[in-house]
Amino acid sequence: MPTFHSLTPADLKPSEWHPFLVGAVAPRPVAFVSTVDAKGRVNLSPYSFFNAFSSNPPILVFSPANRVRDNTQKHTLQNVREVPEVVINICDFAMVEQMSLASTEYEKGVNEFTKAGLTELASELVQPPRVAEAPAAFECVVEQVIELGHNNGAGNLVICRVVRAHFRTDILLPNATGIDPFKLDAVARLGGDWYCRASGPSLFEVPKPNRHIGIGIDQLPEYIRNSDVLTGNELGRLANIELDAMPTAEQVEDFRTEPLVAYTLNKYRSDTPELEKQLLQLGRQYLAEGKLVEAWKGLLLIGPSRT
Ligand SMILES: Cc1cc2nc3c(=O)[nH]c(=O)nc-3n(C[C@H](O)[C@H](O)[C@H](O)COP(=O)(O)O)c2cc1C
């Protein structure tokens, strides 16, 4: 068992607790929020206490905290109370430094579009402008503000309903059916000054289990479940197979003639423990190539001697 450093937030100063919270609840997407005050003065600030919470109705929530320094409220929150409309712009890698610059605590009324060198684009349905450079922008009306406390650092949930959204055409999937994750190039916030970039080799797919019923890890043969070779992720992928999709005994037998399998069976025919290890490794290899059924066939070849 690993060891754990366990904490009770109430026992710590907020400044001691905060790095653990934001360090572990990470990475968080960044809402780059534009607002206007009652005089129409524009504000633009980033918030990583942010996410989408409902698709229908389309609800996004971000949370400006009361300033830790003096328990005052951020300009974004003040503006939302004056004009309950926001644009939530999505921050990509190309603008991450400008977004960070916009988080500077400028005086109220200072327009961070100007400070950060970003371009205002008029919104269609709300008063705050959107960021022309952002790959996606959500025009929202603010439905509710929920104060989570009154202390320094207490969050205020700004519950926003999307009324119009804009997606740069170069980030779209073919036929505009959604967003291409390789093209979005989104950034996210971790603890301290750390960010990450969702692009290139850091992107991977995990097939959704919601359209079918996977068998579950408890149903894996014991020699697979308890092997020293397969990782938790690999067991998870194997267990995501539907019962109907499992290869039949005949298909498993036929698999013996696959060149790589035949070679392995022949090479280790007189060393059963090593053969089992090699078949487990072969299963991993098929999994890594996204070939779930082949992985199962290879692993079930171990079966007859074990079950
Ligand atoms: C990436 C990033 C994420 C941030 N997330 C939050 C947050 O979730 N809540 C918060 O209160 N401040 C957050 N901040 C700090 C605010 O952006 C900062 O206090 C800003 O000056 C607030 O501007 P305003 O007073 O004009 O609204 C974040 C800063 C950065 C750079």
Image (cartoon, helix red, strand yellow):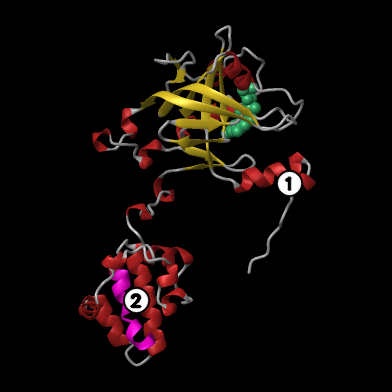
User: Residue 6 in the image: x percent, y percent?
Assistant: 71, 56
The local secondary structure at tag 1 comes to helix
Q: Along the polypeptide, which appears first: circle 2 or circle 1?
A: 1
To which residue does mark 2 refer? 299
Snapshot quadrant of residue 181: top left
Q: Residue at x 75, y 40 (%)?
A: 15
Say whether residue 143 is left or right of residue 262. right
Would residue 277 be counted in the magenta stretch? no
Mark 2 vs ligand 1: CB under 8 Å? no
Q: Residue at x 52, y 22 (%)?
A: 142
Closer to us: 2 or 83: 83
Closer to us: 7 or 274: 7
Give the residue type that dot 2 points to.
Leu
Which image quadrant: the C terminus?
bottom left
Q: Is residue 107 above or below residue 170?
A: above
Q: Residue at x 48, y 76 (%)?
A: 228
To which residue does mark 1 refer? 9
Q: Look at the image and give the residue range highlighted in magenta.
A: 294-307
Say whether residue 276 is left or right of residue 91. left
Label tally:
2
Q: Tell which quarter ligand 1 is in.
A: top right
User: Residue 232 in the image: x percent, y percent?
Assistant: 48, 66
